[in-house]
Amino acid sequence: MSLARGPVLNLEVDTLLCEGPVADGAQAPTRRVLDTNIVLDLWVFDEPQAQALRNSVQSGRTQWLATAAMREELARVLAYPQIAKRLTHRQLPASAVLDHFDRWAQLQPDAPKAPYACKDADDQKFIDLAVQHTAALHSKDAQVLCMKKRLARCGVVLNPTVS
Protein backbone atom coordinates (compact mmCIF):
# COMPACT_ATOMS: atom_id res chain seq x y z
CA MET A 1 0.00 0.00 0.00
CA SER A 2 1.47 3.34 -0.98
CA LEU A 3 1.53 6.37 1.29
CA ALA A 4 -0.43 8.40 -1.26
CA ARG A 5 -3.42 6.07 -0.97
CA GLY A 6 -3.95 6.52 2.79
CA PRO A 7 -5.22 10.13 2.71
CA VAL A 8 -7.50 9.33 -0.22
CA LEU A 9 -9.06 6.46 1.71
CA ASN A 10 -9.45 8.65 4.78
CA LEU A 11 -11.12 11.37 2.72
CA GLU A 12 -13.55 8.84 1.28
CA VAL A 13 -14.35 7.47 4.74
CA ASP A 14 -14.76 11.02 6.10
CA THR A 15 -17.15 11.89 3.27
CA LEU A 16 -19.25 8.80 3.97
CA LEU A 17 -19.32 9.52 7.69
CA CYS A 18 -20.30 13.17 7.24
CA GLU A 19 -22.76 12.94 4.38
CA GLY A 20 -23.75 9.37 3.63
CA PRO A 21 -26.21 7.01 5.25
CA VAL A 22 -25.32 6.00 8.77
CA ALA A 23 -25.25 2.41 10.00
CA ASP A 24 -28.96 2.21 10.80
CA GLY A 25 -29.94 3.59 7.37
CA ALA A 26 -30.71 7.11 8.61
CA GLN A 27 -29.22 10.05 6.73
CA ALA A 28 -26.35 11.93 8.42
CA PRO A 29 -27.02 15.61 9.13
CA THR A 30 -26.53 18.12 6.34
CA ARG A 31 -23.75 20.59 7.08
CA ARG A 32 -24.99 24.16 6.75
CA VAL A 33 -23.59 27.64 7.36
CA LEU A 34 -26.22 30.25 8.26
CA ASP A 35 -25.50 33.92 7.85
CA THR A 36 -26.66 36.40 10.47
CA ASN A 37 -29.82 37.44 8.59
CA ILE A 38 -30.91 33.81 8.40
CA VAL A 39 -30.32 33.38 12.14
CA LEU A 40 -32.45 36.47 12.73
CA ASP A 41 -35.18 34.95 10.53
CA LEU A 42 -35.06 31.77 12.61
CA TRP A 43 -35.26 33.27 16.10
CA VAL A 44 -36.03 36.98 15.97
CA PHE A 45 -38.42 37.50 13.07
CA ASP A 46 -39.93 34.01 13.26
CA GLU A 47 -40.23 33.96 9.46
CA PRO A 48 -42.63 31.27 8.19
CA GLN A 49 -40.23 30.57 5.29
CA ALA A 50 -37.56 29.69 7.88
CA GLN A 51 -39.69 27.10 9.69
CA ALA A 52 -38.32 24.10 7.80
CA LEU A 53 -34.73 25.19 8.43
CA ARG A 54 -35.42 25.85 12.11
CA ASN A 55 -37.01 22.40 12.44
CA SER A 56 -34.04 20.84 10.66
CA VAL A 57 -31.58 22.52 13.03
CA GLN A 58 -33.55 21.60 16.13
CA SER A 59 -34.15 18.00 15.05
CA GLY A 60 -30.47 17.40 14.28
CA ARG A 61 -31.01 16.92 10.53
CA THR A 62 -28.84 20.03 10.09
CA GLN A 63 -25.35 20.38 11.46
CA TRP A 64 -25.08 24.17 11.81
CA LEU A 65 -21.45 25.17 11.46
CA ALA A 66 -20.34 28.54 12.83
CA THR A 67 -17.36 30.40 14.25
CA ALA A 68 -16.81 32.65 17.25
CA ALA A 69 -16.67 35.62 14.84
CA MET A 70 -20.17 34.74 13.62
CA ARG A 71 -21.45 34.73 17.18
CA GLU A 72 -19.80 38.10 17.82
CA GLU A 73 -21.48 39.51 14.71
CA LEU A 74 -24.86 38.18 15.86
CA ALA A 75 -24.41 39.75 19.31
CA ARG A 76 -23.52 43.08 17.70
CA VAL A 77 -26.50 42.97 15.30
CA LEU A 78 -28.91 42.12 18.12
CA ALA A 79 -28.03 45.50 19.64
CA TYR A 80 -28.96 47.46 16.47
CA PRO A 81 -31.92 49.76 17.28
CA GLN A 82 -34.30 48.17 14.74
CA ILE A 83 -33.48 44.66 15.97
CA ALA A 84 -33.63 45.67 19.64
CA LYS A 85 -37.07 47.18 18.98
CA ARG A 86 -38.26 43.90 17.48
CA LEU A 87 -36.86 41.94 20.42
CA THR A 88 -38.64 44.25 22.86
CA HIS A 89 -41.90 43.94 20.92
CA ARG A 90 -41.65 40.13 21.13
CA GLN A 91 -40.52 40.28 24.78
CA LEU A 92 -37.48 38.32 23.69
CA PRO A 93 -34.12 39.12 25.28
CA ALA A 94 -31.09 39.14 23.00
CA SER A 95 -29.58 36.54 25.32
CA ALA A 96 -32.31 34.07 24.28
CA VAL A 97 -31.24 34.37 20.63
CA LEU A 98 -27.60 33.90 21.63
CA ASP A 99 -28.68 30.87 23.68
CA HIS A 100 -30.13 29.35 20.49
CA PHE A 101 -26.79 29.97 18.78
CA ASP A 102 -24.90 28.39 21.67
CA ARG A 103 -27.20 25.38 21.77
CA TRP A 104 -27.45 24.57 18.07
CA ALA A 105 -24.34 25.95 16.35
CA GLN A 106 -21.25 23.76 16.29
CA LEU A 107 -18.27 26.05 16.67
CA GLN A 108 -15.42 25.61 14.24
CA PRO A 109 -12.09 27.38 13.97
CA ASP A 110 -11.95 30.28 11.52
CA ALA A 111 -11.67 28.90 8.01
CA PRO A 112 -8.89 29.73 5.57
CA LYS A 113 -9.67 32.19 2.79
CA ALA A 114 -11.83 30.67 0.05
CA PRO A 115 -10.75 30.92 -3.59
CA TYR A 116 -13.42 33.57 -4.22
CA ALA A 117 -13.81 36.87 -2.40
CA CYS A 118 -17.12 38.51 -1.57
CA LYS A 119 -17.50 42.24 -2.19
CA ASP A 120 -18.93 42.52 1.32
CA ALA A 121 -16.06 41.66 3.67
CA ASP A 122 -18.52 40.94 6.50
CA ASP A 123 -19.89 37.98 4.51
CA GLN A 124 -16.52 36.43 3.70
CA LYS A 125 -16.36 34.40 6.92
CA PHE A 126 -19.58 32.59 5.98
CA ILE A 127 -18.27 31.79 2.50
CA ASP A 128 -14.90 30.65 3.83
CA LEU A 129 -16.49 28.26 6.34
CA ALA A 130 -18.94 26.84 3.80
CA VAL A 131 -16.15 26.23 1.29
CA GLN A 132 -13.87 24.64 3.89
CA HIS A 133 -16.56 22.15 4.94
CA THR A 134 -18.34 21.86 1.58
CA ALA A 135 -21.44 22.92 3.47
CA ALA A 136 -24.66 24.42 2.18
CA LEU A 137 -24.71 28.19 2.66
CA HIS A 138 -27.90 30.02 3.59
CA SER A 139 -27.90 33.76 2.92
CA LYS A 140 -30.15 36.51 1.57
CA ASP A 141 -27.30 38.95 1.04
CA ALA A 142 -27.13 40.18 -2.56
CA GLN A 143 -23.31 40.12 -2.52
CA VAL A 144 -23.42 36.42 -1.64
CA LEU A 145 -26.29 35.52 -3.96
CA CYS A 146 -24.38 36.82 -6.99
CA MET A 147 -21.62 34.29 -6.18
CA LYS A 148 -23.85 31.24 -6.65
CA LYS A 149 -21.96 29.80 -9.66
CA ARG A 150 -18.53 30.45 -8.15
CA LEU A 151 -19.56 28.82 -4.88
CA ALA A 152 -20.95 25.82 -6.77
CA ARG A 153 -17.47 25.31 -8.26
CA CYS A 154 -16.25 24.87 -4.67
CA GLY A 155 -19.00 22.36 -3.87
CA VAL A 156 -21.13 24.88 -1.94
CA VAL A 157 -24.87 24.92 -2.64
CA LEU A 158 -26.46 28.28 -1.95
CA ASN A 159 -29.87 28.27 -0.25
CA PRO A 160 -30.88 24.67 -0.92
CA THR A 161 -34.43 23.65 -0.12
CA VAL A 162 -34.75 22.22 3.37
CA SER A 163 -37.20 19.40 3.88
Image (tube, rainbow, N blue to C red):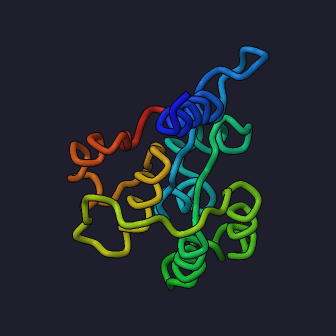
Point out residue 138 in the picture as x, y percentages from the top left corner.
44, 49
Point out residue 36 in the picture as x, y percentages from the top left corner.
49, 65
Vertical relation: 14 (above or below) 27: below
Position of residue 66 in the picture relative to residue 145 (left or right): right
Q: Residue at x 53, y 46 (%)?
A: 32
Q: How many marks?
A: 0
Image quadrant where one finds the C terminus: top right
Point out residue 127 in the picture as x, y percentages from the top left corner.
38, 59
Q: Residue furthest front?
A: 1
Q: Residue at x 59, y 54 (%)?
A: 65
Q: Residue furthest top?
A: 25
Position of residue 83 in the picture relative to residue 141 (left or right): right
Front residue of this view, candidates 116 and 34: 116
Point out residue 121 in the picture as x, y percentages from the top left corner.
31, 75
Q: Residue at x 61, y 30 (%)?
A: 13
Image quadrant where one finds the N terminus: top right
Front residue of this view, candidates 144 and 112: 112
Vertical relation: 33 (above or below) 59: below
Q: Residue at x 22, y 48 (%)?
A: 150
Residue 84 can be seen in this image = no
Position of residue 159 in the picture relative to residue 102 (left or right): left
Splitting the image into 4 quarters, where does residue 43 fall? Answer: bottom right
Residue 122 can be seen in this image = yes
Front residue of this view, candidates 160 and 7: 7
